[in-house]
Amino acid sequence: MADLVSHPDEVKVVSRRFGLGAANLDRYLELDGYKAVQKALAMQSADIIEEVKKSNLRGRGGAGFPTGLKWSFVPKESAKPKYVLCNGDESEPGTCKDRLIFEHDPHAVIEGAVIAGLAVGARKAYIYVRGEYRYLSLIMQKAIADAYGRGFLGKNIFGSGIDFDVFWHGGAGAYEVGEESALMESLEGKRGIPRIRPPFPAVVGLWGGPTVINNVETLASVPHIMLGGGEWFANLGTPRNGGTRLFCLSGHMNRCGVYELPLGYNLKKMIYEVGGGITGGRSLKAVVPGGSSTPLFRADEIDVAMDFDSVAKAGSMLGSGGVTAIDDQTCMVKFALRIIKFYQHESCGWCIPCREGTDWIKKSLTRFHAGGGLRKDIDDVKYLAQNMLGRTFCPLGDAAAMPIISIVDKFRDEFEAHLEGRPCPHAKEGDAANALLPMLAH
Amino acid sequence: MRFSDAFEARFTEMLTHYPTKRSVLVPTLLFAQDEVGYVSEDVIAELATRLELTTLDVRNVMSYYSMLVTKPRGKYNVQVCTNIACTLKGGDELLSHCAKRLGIGHKGTTADGQFSLEEVECIGACSWAPAIQVNYDFHENLDVPKMDAVLDGYAKK
Ligand SMILES: Cc1cc2nc3c(=O)[nH]c(=O)nc-3n(C[C@H](O)[C@H](O)[C@H](O)COP(=O)(O)O)c2cc1C
Ligand code: FES
């Protein structure tokens, strides 16, 4: 459905089969499908983990945790069954890549989940697909059924003597369910309220059993690592940041789309060359580098290598791969308001700093943008956000606070331009204050 | 309560996927809603019985998920994303255009029961913004004329 794009700088690993009809099992087999899992079946589980460690693969869901290390935390012996859980809740604003993987290469997700299971000693995997992605859940269900049909799943897979089951699961609309512990609650048929950690899911997860939770793109990378080798994958990226990733270019760029680029690719180049620069001949004001929860960069801060460590060093996060460019005609107060409105809506309400903090900031910014702001509100908004950081039950509170703090810090002049009842300098006719006030009712 | 054969087949199969019955609850509520139009009192009672839960428990879970509703809505639920990528590309204009054209606001339904309107959070179409979903179908890279064409298409269906 969604259009595919390409650029000469792309290095296609995870997206190698996009557009080639690989959702069809025979086609997938022609394109090296299910070879990686057979290779893994012939390996010791410790050696699979070693290979993934060598690849420097880090989680593509947002936090960038080293995948091999995560797998190594799963205890060898466990009285309760172990599980693999694939996180396909994809709902971090700015992120639209797992969707393409589900659509174009669903068997790679299955294969990655089985290999993860072999590595940690799990014999069941669940693939959670967000409720809005109905057509993708149907593609996934068919892929799973086809794999069972050939004996790639189920009893005695590939004649190995090992039984392995893969099931799909569906959500029904909730960003918070993408948080790993809330994801498990949702799969168990409950409200998506996060769990306290420790214990971490690798030790106590689904139904109390050790559980490996990985993003769709992370798992879809694994078969390529098994076939190409950990070293090959590691060398595609930068030290400690192996491989490529799917960057979702959105916002005011001429050639938005999902591009697979090596980790460490320069952000400025990504925006001006891959993304084709800013639309309408306007100039760039800011960039969201890794989904709406990451601190923003100003236009003069984007000479950054896009890998986990370099972006962290520059004060933000590589996050989920959503790169959103914002032009000079955009009101950053309104943008901050839109971000906090999202997190306020999605806060599960379980812990007070997140529930009250997001609501309070939303109300302040709504009033502020509508012209009712006081100078002290600027610092109050930042103070509220700072007091959420690290004080919430799960990282949703941090996700809400980080972009807000960065916008207040980096675009303070725009807040000041709204003071003393002045209308928003960027407002178009008919949308200023009146259009915004109903937001309070949501 | 009677659901379709496809629903029943899926339900029976899904129960075998998990160690606990209630694990099927969230996806099953959505499939039930697809058949009935909303999560009715009957649906809640039926699923509670089948999964050995209290109706309160089912209600409690249901109220958490934004796609599940307890009242009927239009045949076509127009969901306009106004999150970051879409707002930068005109998502708000699309939303106000739909509101004007359909004469309804957020979560409203037209008198003839054809359309509902909803402002939604990111639907995973950011690189193809602004985007909407009508029921489960995506429509991407929209502007006001294209939006009109989409709505015309559904109105004729
Ligand atoms: C509020 C919140 C939402 C999240 N949403 C997602 C999501 O939609 N998809 C995802 O893969 N990870 C999401 N994560 C990250 C997961 O908690 C988890 O770190 C990830 O799935 C682990 O997989 P990885 O190591 O392969 O990245 C979210 C985290 C938070 C705090
Ligand atoms: S922001 Fe609209 S689809 Fe992601």
Image: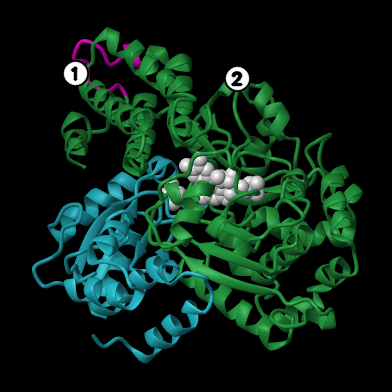
Tell me which chain appears cyan: B
Residue A117 position, x and y percent, is: 72, 63
Residue A216 position, x and y percent, is: 63, 57
Q: Which mark is residue A60?
A: none
Verify whether residue A422 appears in magenta.
yes
At x 76%, y 35%, the residue is A264
At x 77%, y 64%, the residue is A118
Q: Amino acid at mark 1?
A: Gly
Tell me which chain appears green: A
Up the image or down, A373 lies above or below A118; here it is above
What range of the chain is rendered magenta?
A415-425
Residue A360 position, x and y percent, is: 27, 26
Residue B151 position, x and y percent, is: 27, 67
Q: Which mark is residue A300?
A: 2
Report how many numbered discs are placed on residues in the image.
2
Predominant SS of the magenta segment = loop
Q: Which residue is mark 1?
A: A372
Q: Is mark 2 within 8 Å of ligand 2?
A: no
